[in-house]
Image (spheres, grey):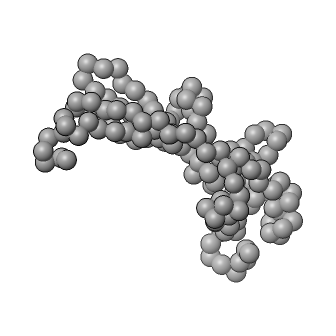
């Protein structure tokens, strides 16, 4: 329930409740969240607070919102293993809007930037990529 006397903003409390439902499996991947109107009624909140809560969850990559359809728990995505051979530099950052569109990733999901000598830089969605280093090629002190 929402504690209106708490110092924690009500939209954060609602995001906490929905996040806990996702983590506990009460809301499953791909499942629709209750409508904004339903959440407003159930938790006695205004539309702005509900939308702010959903925005928090979108920024965390937990939910996706489809115009005219509603918000859904983000579906499970198969993980792809990417082998990194030889020297490499990997950094993580938030993608540009064009990268989000090109990679088909929702708001809140970072990307890996993989740079290797004599190879083209790769931008990889961090939510569905597992980077694997070739252990035989790592210096002994980095294994």
View extreme (front): residue: 136
Query: Residue 69: where, in percent of width, then height?
Result: 82, 41
Q: Name, please, the residue furthest toward the bottom.
A: 5
State the image coordinates of residue 26 (x, y, percent, origin top left).
71, 62
In this view of the protein, can residue 123 be seen by the observer?
Answer: yes
Residue closer to the observer: 137 or 16: 137
| Identity of the residue drawn at 12% across and 45% down | 140
In the displayed structure, would residue 92 be above or below residue 73?
Answer: above
Q: In which quarter of the image is residue 50?
A: bottom right
Please report the residue visible at 67 percent of the width from the left and 50 percent of the height from the top: 29
Image-based side of 134 in relation to 71, left or right: left
Image coords of residue 139 (percent x, y): 14, 41
Which residue is drawn at the image coordinates 36% and 24% (left, top)?
121
Q: Quadrant of the N terminus?
A: bottom right
Q: In this view, does 127 lie to the left or right of 46?
A: left
| Residue situated in front as seen by the camera: 111 or 3 | 111
Q: Is residue 28 left or right of residue 125?
A: right
Work out whether residue 65 or residue 86 is closer to the camera in this orientation and state it: 86
Q: Vertical placement of 44 versus 85: above or below?
A: below
Displayed quadrant of residue 105: top right
Q: Is residue 18 visible?
A: no
Q: Which residue lies furthest to the left in this view?
A: 140
Quarter location, residue 2? bottom right
């Amino acid at each position: 329930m929402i504690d209106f006397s708490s110092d924690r903003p009500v939209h954060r409390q609602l995001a906490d409740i929905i996040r806990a439902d996702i983590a506990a499996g009460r809301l499953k991947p791909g499942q629709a969240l209750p409508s904004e109107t339903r959440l407003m009624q159930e938790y006695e909140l205004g539309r702005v607070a509900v939308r702010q809560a959903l925005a928090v969850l979108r920024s965390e990559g937990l939910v996706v919102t489809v115009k005219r359809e509603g918000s859904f728990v983000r579906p499970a995505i198969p993980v792809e293993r990417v082998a990194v051979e030889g020297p490499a530099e990997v950094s993580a950052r938030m993608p540009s809007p064009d990268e989000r569109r090109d990679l088909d990733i929702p708001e809140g999901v970072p990307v890996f930037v993989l740079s290797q000598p004599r190879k083209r830089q790769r931008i990889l969605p961090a939510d569905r990529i597992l980077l694997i280093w070739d252990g035989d090629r790592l210096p002994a002190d980095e294994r």
